[in-house]
Image (cartoon, grey):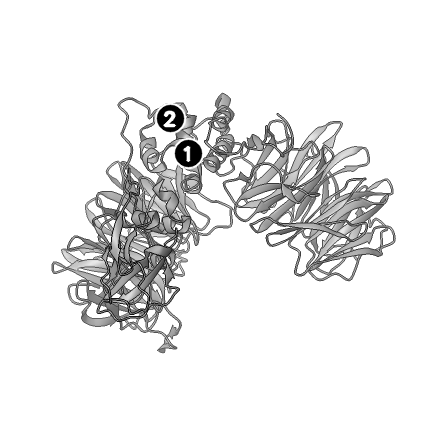
Amino acid sequence: MPSDVLSPDVLSLIARLKGRIPEGFRPREWVVRTPAGEHPVPPPVQTFLALVWPPWQRLATDDEYGWEVHLPAHGEVEAGLVEEETPRAWYAIGHHEGQWYLLVDLAEADDDFHVHWVDHEGGDRVGAGGRRLSTVLAELRVVTDHFDFPRAGPRPSGDETGIDAHTLVHADPDELLPLLDDVTSAGGRLAAGVYRTSADRHRGSNLATRRQLLTMDAARWGASDLARAIAAVPVTDAPADTWTVDWATGARLDVRVRARFDVGGSQVTAVVQGRPVLVTLDGSTLHVHDLATGAVVVEARLKSKQGFKALAVTESDGRWIAVTGAECTGWCDDDGCGGDCGGLVQRWNLADGTPIGEPLTGHLGSVQAVAVAVVAGEQVIVSGGGDRTLRMWDLRTGAPLGTPAAEPPDIDEPGAIAAIAVGEAGGRPIAITGTSGGTGLVWDLESGGTPGPALTTDDPDRVDAWISSAAISRLDGRPTVVTSGDDEVRLWDPLTGKQIGDAIGDGCVTSAVAEIDGRGVIVTASYRGVISAWDPRDRRVVRGPVPVFADSGGLVDSLTTAVVSGRLVALVGTYKHTFVVDLNAAPDTVRGTRGQGPRRGHTDQILDVASGETDSGAYLVTGGDDGSARVWDPVDGTELCAPLTGHSGRVEGVAAARVGDRAAAVTADDEKLQVWDPFTGELMRTVSVGESEYGHEVLRMSATEHGGRAVGLTAGYDGRVLGWDLDDGAPAGLPPLTGHADYIGAVLPVTVGGRRVVAVDDGDTVRIWDLESGGTTRALRHESGVQHMAVIASPVRPLVLTSLHDTLHVWDPATGEHMGSVDTGVTVCAMSAAEIDGRPLVATGSSGRTVRLWDAMTCRQVGSTLTVPEEIGAVALTPGGRLAVAFGPDIALLSRGVVSSGAWGGA
């Protein structure tokens, strides 16, 4: 195939630049004249010369000059163009606007051939090296005014889209996603919900990974039949999956959350070429997402000497333009501005991120808000920021308009302009500004930005400390200003500056205006991402609330709205994610197998997992950042008892133990250990570690047995490991293990030579302690800090496993011998180990959302790699050989499946 003759790096870069090899192209016998005589054109060069680019784009150097580069642009090279004693088989493949030919020596061309730059006037001497084609392509960018939107698949004639398990795995996401809004049956809505849940994850993945993610998400929705059907879909050349998903929780799944994008920062929406888009400025990277498909249609790095704070977009003369405000170092106070700061306003081609004109200067501080208004028929940039002034600029020419307008001196709480909205009131164009001091102002733009009335209220309960967003809309036929701050949303009359009616909401950090069924609504977001739509007439919630990431630790940074396939959606941004919320959808309309919905559970990240087995049955214990622990039935994922609560904060660790003659779940917060009956939820014992004169603040915890009694081991910030009798809550009579660093990474018990010892992760050393004597028996030294640790408590060959970044190490705790290591290829973020069927195995969770299984003796991977939808918080291998994986607030339990040769387990 033609793609085989170019290196993967070259092919990837060609795809990034939107080039393609024509369908049906095949290299042929082709001979050309060169300075060294006639020479065949090798297949890699022929394939490159056959490339086709979209007709609406150009290629240019990705630097301050932006020289246009014509590739491919081929032709024969005349003798004498290159000064050399022995002529070479030169052939031109391109031309650079800076008057350079791009040449290749046909005699040396490989799959990433060298490209040589030669002045078009000739006489240059060419060195032996040149630059690899991949390097040349990496330094180019696309220049275009066109947006290349994906095309949706053909719409079906009937009620459904024909969605089945095979379609979910194999269909092109850009074609399938727009069709999901047409689904009406219960089964179709379920499949649509499953597909959308992790579409941002599986969109760019291979088919085997997509199958895994869809299987997991079907289990999270409670759709066990669909999960099995997806897992059975054949994928060509994919290894058999080692694991079968038994069940999983779906703590935050909501059919109204239809997508997530891995971008944050300043955000606006627009309709471009008839398609609703989300425009995001994440750091210095401009993203344009097609909201119908979720595809990224623009990803361009904006080059500026300053960071970015504000964003607006508009269409002008048939071209879409992004306007940015800069964030810069400096300060502004009541006495003026100082420091090395002059915030820039800049214009960019939205389609490719190229700058338009020179930066607009004049602001003394950061530019925190920008908007584009129409004044006297012309488009005008309106900007404001830390210097508390409003400035206006001609969008086309960049010329400043009028005199910079400052806040009136009689403002009670002056502050930086943090929000700008533009519109019309009384037949005149106006701007509304909101400040960090909580002041709203109306400005007359037609008079050059004259300050008008301040937004005032007689409400004695107003507590706004700043205004974070502002909008101008028409409600019931009259212009209305909507502002939000750190607590509530308020409506104002822009002609008088007076508040209209009561405030809306409680804890609303930002808001936007929109329409539902032809009626104006106000969409609000709380700090923790609870989205609601309000009727401004009676202050009643008409849609929601939708807890997008409630109690997850996320904070809302932005909120905007759009209409996608006739449905109102809210775009909710944090510093790293954007969630797309369907405000037309009804909650809880998707049901899985036997009519059940997603299993709920933790509301925040799960931090630890432990498994236990007793005569009464097996159980799993999880502890989370939400301050609760939960006990799960491994058979079907139901909770065996009510959540275990009463912790002082997050649950630092969990363990399964036997206390007396009863099974127990042990949980730890920073103050105490609690011992629970895992089947009834009864609190059997509280061990007040922090209040004891002997005790300390708990950092890590594990449970073991010593002298026939259950013992809890705690590691504290004081560098000590202490033992506690879980039967009576008193110190266990074991000597304190001291001398560690302030931060202990793990404390895990293991039996060595018939004696109970404990492995303590102490920075770059793991110390093996004898519990009874309190003495150190071995020190396992590493080159740098140990990040995670696990033990295999085999009576025949106990092992200690440690990880440093992406390297897994295996140690013998009896001798201190380093037995081997393996490069896992990714940073390890969680570990668990166990002896299963006589084989020492360790499971590692990675920062890339993958779980791998390793044979601790051979240091080789066992079976296939598992990919999960969210970042991994903990993993656990159960005594029965099953795998528990905690990701985000969810937990999944998987069993061994039929695996490929050399793997382990059976059907």
Report which quarter residue 438 is drawn in: bottom left
**Residue 302 versus residue 623 in the image, above or below:** below
Q: Residue at x 51, y 34 (%)?
A: 216
Earlier-in-chain disc, 2 versus 1: 2
Task: List the residue tagged with mark 1.
Answer: 195
Q: Amino acid at mark 2?
A: Ile
Report the side of 855 relative to 427 (left or right).
Answer: right
Where disc 2 sits, the SS reads loop
Dot 1 surroundings within 10 Å: few (below 14), some, or many (20 or more)?
many
Point out residue 782 in the picture as x, y percentages from the top left corner: 69, 59
Q: Which residue is mark 2?
A: 163
Distance from Cα at disc 2 to Cα at disc 1: 10 Å
- Give the residue type that dot 1 points to: Tyr
Instruction: Quadrant for the N terminus, please.
Output: top left
* Quadrant of the drawing holding the C terminus: top right
Asked whether, in this view, residue 459 is left or right of residue 594, the answer is left
Nearer to me, 537 or 232: 232
The answer to which of 476 and 749 lies nearer the viewer is 749
Residue 484 visible to an observer of this rendering: no
Instruction: Return the x and y of residue 51 as percentages of the image width and height.
Output: 28, 48
Is there any visible trace of residue 86 in the rendered image? yes
Residue name at image x 53 percent, y 34 percent = 239
Q: Determine which quarter of the picture holds residue 371.
A: bottom left
Neighbor class of circle 2 (other Cα within 10 Å; few <14, some 14-19, many 20+) is: some
Front position in the image: 317 or 265? 317
Q: Is residue 622 above or below residue 635?
A: below
